[in-house]
């Protein structure tokens, strides 16, 4: 697979809201409170109001469903939908759940991203799929995002 860097995203997130022991597993709603993104072709800020809605499956995998909005440094707003998963050894996942910053190389965190941008200088985002390789910190998520060529 060929890819090229798109941007690095650092999202600030609030404390998860958890509905434990739901029929399909634990549900987590994690509000996005802001953040930044920066790459060679675009940069700006992540707007507050989005969220990561997760399902923690019986096998310990977190299914990720992310919906957020971005604002470029020149004022253009676009939308992103991300679907992914995060999993790792139980002790590593327990450390993350306890709020410890665990390096991303110790677990699997991948997300497929799809964008909706208005006509204009960022319309090219509407015609690509991106893959993010992530890391979860105590109050942030960081993703290195690559355009799949």
Image (cartoon, rainbow, N blue to C red):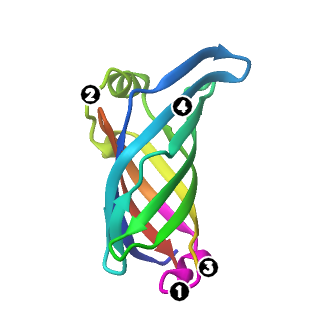
x and y percent of residue 120 in the render?
53, 86
Q: Report the front residue among 134 and 43.
A: 43
Answer with the quarter of the image where residue 100 lies.
Answer: top left
Label 2 secondary element: loop
Label 1 secondary element: loop
x and y percent of residue 16 in the render?
45, 27
- For disc 3, the neighbor class at 10 Å (few under 14, some 14 to 19, many from 20) is few
- For disc 1, the neighbor class at 10 Å (few under 14, some 14 to 19, many from 20) is few
Q: Nearer the viewer, mark 3 or mark 1?
A: 1
Residue 75 highlighted magenta (yes or no): no
Label 4 secondary element: strand
Answer with the quarter of the image where residue 33 lies.
Answer: top left
Evaluate if marks 4 and 3 touch, with contact meaning CB atoms under 8 Å apart: no
Q: Residue at x 48, y 73 (%)?
A: 147
Q: Residue at x 55, y 62 (%)?
A: 79
The CA distance from mark 3 to mark 1 is 13 Å
Look at mark 4 in the image and give the residue it sits on: 29
Q: Nearer the viewer, mark 4 or mark 3?
A: 4
Q: Nearer the viewer, mark 2 or mark 3?
A: 3
Look at mark 1 in the image and give the residue it sits on: 120
Q: Which mark is residue 100?
A: 2
Q: Which residues are magenta?
A: 119-131
């Amino acid at each position: 697979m060929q890819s090229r860097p798109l941007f690095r995203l650092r999202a600030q997130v609030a404390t998860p809201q958890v509905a434990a022991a739901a029929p399909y597993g634990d549900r987590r709603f994690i509000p996005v409170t802001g953040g930044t993104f920066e790459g060679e072709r675009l940069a700006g800020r992540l707007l507050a109001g989005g969220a990561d809605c997760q399902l923690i499956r019986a096998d310990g995998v977190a299914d990720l469903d992310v919906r957020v909005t971005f604002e470029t440094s020149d004022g253009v707003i676009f939308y992103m939908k991300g679907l992914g998963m995060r999993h790792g050894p139980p002790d590593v996942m327990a450390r993350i759940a306890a709020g410890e910053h665990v390096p991303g190389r110790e677990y699997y965190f991948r997300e497929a991203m799809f964008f909706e941008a208005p006509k204009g200088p960022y319309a090219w985002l509407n015609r690509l799929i991106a893959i993010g390789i992530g890391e979860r910190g105590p109050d942030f998520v960081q993703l290195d995002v690559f355009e799949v060529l």
